[in-house]
Amino acid sequence: MKTNQAIPSIIISLERSALDRWGQGDPSGFLEISASDVVYFDPYLEKRIDGLEALTQYYEKIRGQIHIDRYELLNPLVQVCGDAAVLTFNYVSYTGESQDRWNCTEVYRRDDDRWQIIQTHWSYTQRV
Amino acid sequence: MKTNQAIPSIIISLERSALDRWGQGDPSGFLEISASDVVYFDPYLEKRIDGLEALTQYYEKIRGQIHIDRYELLNPLVQVCGDAAVLTFNYVSYTGESQDRWNCTEVYRRDDDRWQIIQTHWSYTQRV
């Protein structure tokens, strides 16, 4: 069991590793650290996705289609509450001349000393 | 201390009470149940808001300006993890002939047997 001080760096490291793979078209980085009961929002959905099976089906449709040159993970904050950790950050992805700006909330839960995502919420920053 | 079974109904009740007041132009329903370290996203911001003081300043600017005739809180789900509870739902507000559709994630934390919001994330559903 790690001390509370170490949890933020563990969580941010998990997220960066998943984002690195995501930017190369590989959604498995996120799927591998998501719990079976994960719930998920992004701006392309009519409603929340419930469960890893449904999220997997959704992500498999875009496997290989994402390419991000580089990204910035801005001002990440981890709020630790026992076996839950809430990671929030702003994110900017750069591809060629274009950039996208996002808000993100990830809730991680520690199950048997392994941190897994139980909630993901991606939305565009100030695109209203 | 309530049993885990009761937590979802407590959380959803807190959220509905705050939403009822919100729809009448009163942001205090949310401010009163937000923790000092609350973080906040919505589609109008350049970046995450950190802390109750900053959120209060933001909300005070729109006090009295919101009017919602009625709303639907769709498919609310509460994931309980010790003293943390993650509430997610889709939300539709109706005012006159117009409607707005939202995704929402609220993370509540139990401090001294009182549940308070530590993270709020509102985004539009499928407005991309």
Image: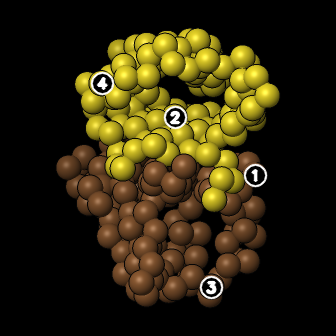
Chain colours: A brown, B yellow
Secondary structure of the residue carrying tag 2 is strand
Characterize the local packing of mark 2: few (<14), some (14-19) or many (20 or more) Cα atoms within 10 angstroms.
many
**Chain of the residue under label 2:** B
What residue sits right under mark 1 in the picture?
Answer: A46
Characterize the local packing of mark 3: few (<14), some (14-19) or many (20 or more) Cα atoms within 10 angstroms.
few
In the rendered image, residues at marks 2 and 1 fall on the same chain? no
Can residue A75 be seen here? The reply is yes
For badge 2, the amino acid type reads Glu
Residue sitting nearer the eye, A79 or B100:
B100
Q: Tell me which residue sits at (63%, 22%) in the image.
A: B12
**Chain of the residue under label 4:** B
What residue sits right under mark 4 in the picture?
Answer: B57
Q: First in sequence, mark 3 or 1: give its number.
A: 1
Q: Position of residue B128 (x, y in %)?
A: 63, 59
Q: First in sequence, mark 2 or 4: give its number.
A: 4
What residue sits right under mark 3 in the picture?
Answer: A65
Q: CA distance from mark 2 to mark 1?
A: 19 Å
Looking at the image, residue B60 lies above or below residue A98: above
Q: Nearer the viewer, mark 4 or mark 3?
A: 4
Residue sitting nearer the eye, A89 or B66:
B66
Q: Which mark is residue B106?
A: 2
Q: CA distance from mark 2 to mark 4?
A: 20 Å
**Chain of the residue under label 3:** A
Badges 4 and 1: C-beta atoms under 8 Å apart? no
Secondary structure of the residue carrying tag 3 is loop
Q: Which quadrant holds residue A8?
A: bottom left
Q: Position of residue B126 (x, y in %)?
A: 69, 53
Q: Nearer the viewer, mark 4 or mark 1?
A: 4
Q: Tell me which residue sits at (64%, 40%) in the image.
A: B102
Q: CA distance from mark 2 to mark 3?
A: 31 Å
